[in-house]
Amino acid sequence: MPNELLVEMATHLELSDVIKLRRCCKRLHAITKAHNLWRHVTQRFYEDHLLVPPEEGLGRITAEDLEEWVIRRSHAQEVWKANGQLRPQTRIVGSCVPEPDFRDATFYYLLPGGRWLFVAYPFSFACVFDLDSATPKSHFLFDLNEFNPEISANREFLTYSFCDDRSNSQLLRIACTIQNSRDPRTFIFDLRFDYSLKEAPPTVNTTATFRKRLSGWGSEMVSLNKQYLVEVCVDPRVTVYSKEIVAYRYNDARGHDSIPLLEAAATIRFEQRSVQLLFFIYDDVFVVHTFDGGMCLFNIVQRDPGTALSHSIELLYKIPLSFHTPSGIRHSLSTSYIAVATRAGEFQGIRIPHHRSKPPQVVQLGKRDMFLQDEFGRIGTLKAVGVSVSIRTKGFNNCCEPIWIINHKFGPGENPAVWEEKVVHVQIPEISYMSRLLGFSEDIGRLVLLKDGSYRDFVVVDLLPEPCMTEFLS
């Protein structure tokens, strides 16, 4: 039988079967090293488990690296199912905060996939840390004072948002918006990752910069996709905050030598309090969640020429759902998934079909008392809610504290959620009751925490370090 046909047949096998096939003979060993095989295995694996695809792209990464990528994440899936052991390893990463008096305003964001940590210091520069590096160091990205020196002089705070462009894993788009109403403007950058060079930092290009009309309203939260930036604005003069949602077509601001004034493409009144969630789901459909108003799904629609505004924002669905802690968002080809934890310790999942005529579906995922809001509020309690896995622990020095790991996976199809729970006792002496959770990657089992209240260092905790992969390759 030709090798090409054997490779094609092997693409339909599960990962464990591919590893077994490798041990049969030299010919099959060579077959299991084929790039085409691992490209298919990788794609099927991240689609089945709602994982973030390889940042390098399937066509730009070697077969060996694809194999390691799948094995590392497969091991994580097994551990979350209580079939494997945690082997925590910690690293302390130094971080110098330029404005120590405003250190608590530092913005941290663990990028999808768990490798890169984005850090933006108040009134100063932004950088990234490669957490897969043995000794992570900061890589400078941009300093907004180069575009607007008044940011530092006037102590302007900014809101950050990231575009989830699933069509290009090597591109990350960032929007930086000044929060106050005196200088309403937004800066949008493209971060490009060149994975052909090992440990190469991303490069930065300015995509668009624009001003907005003075309205006396401040910016509470923003989100963007490939062409629109959506902003929730608040009126600080009103006790019960009045709000409106404003959409800007930021591509109209591209290619200008100066900073243009960009008119709103659409607005809609939105009188709710405490916006907790705002991001695009698919196409021009975005979701907004408030603590007391539930979850709303909106769509940006282009209107006929000659109208006062070029677009409109239409309400598609409203879900009476109140929660305290949301997960990030995961996507399949046709559906997006969010998991949330309520103040009562209940977990719920939301399936959002990528079709405007199909309403979102709420799935009950169960209840755990250790995720009660009273527990969240206790000093030193650290919690992370993911789409499939949630973690709760405490940060006390020199104590062997329990880590509760809850596997509440739900995904494609109508199958009920899988509920599995395990408790492990590990000692992480680098963190304390002053520690703060910065990010959690359920794909690779990585926690990122502030070491203490100084904000000088953060701790990378790999619950599933890479040496575990050798167990699959023996």
Image: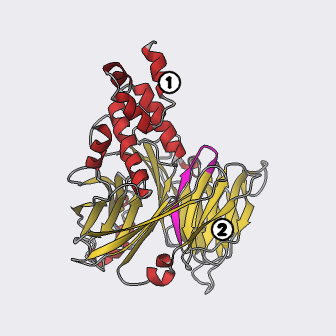
* Front residue of this view, candidates 132 and 36: 36
* Percent coordinates x, y for residue 413 in the rendering: 65, 50
Instruction: Give the x, y percent position of residue 319.
Output: 70, 67
Q: Is residue 332 magenta?
A: yes
- Image position, residue 84 (x, y; %): 36, 55
Q: Nearer the viewer, residue 44 or 326?
A: 44
Query: Which span is picked out in magenta?
Result: 325-335
Residue pictured at 62% horizontal, 58% vertical = 416
Instruction: Tell me the residue that label 2 is attached to.
Output: 295
Name the mark on residue 270: none
Q: Earlier in the sequence, mark 2 or mark 1?
A: 1
Q: Classify 97 as above or below 274.
A: above
Secondary structure under badge 2?
Answer: strand
Label 1 neighbourhood size at 10 Å, few (<14), some (14-19), many (20+)?
Answer: few
Type of amino acid at the residue the image marks with label 1: Met
| Extreme residue in the top direction | 2
Query: In the rendered image, which residue does mark 1 sit on?
Result: 9
Residue 330 included in the magenta stretch of the image: yes
Q: Residue at x 58, y 69 (%)?
A: 366
Compared across the picture, whether 58 is left or right of 95 comes to right
Position of 71 with respect to 397 (left or right) is right
Q: What whole-number distance in Å separates the C-alpha atoms at marks 2 and 1?
A: 45 Å
Is residue 275 among the parts visible in the rendering? yes
Q: Quadrant of the C terminus?
A: top left
Q: Main secondary structure of the magenta part?
A: strand
Image-quadrant location for residue 60: top left
- Label 2 Cα crowd, 10 Å radius (few <14 / some 14-19 / many 20+): many
Which residue is farthest bottom?
239
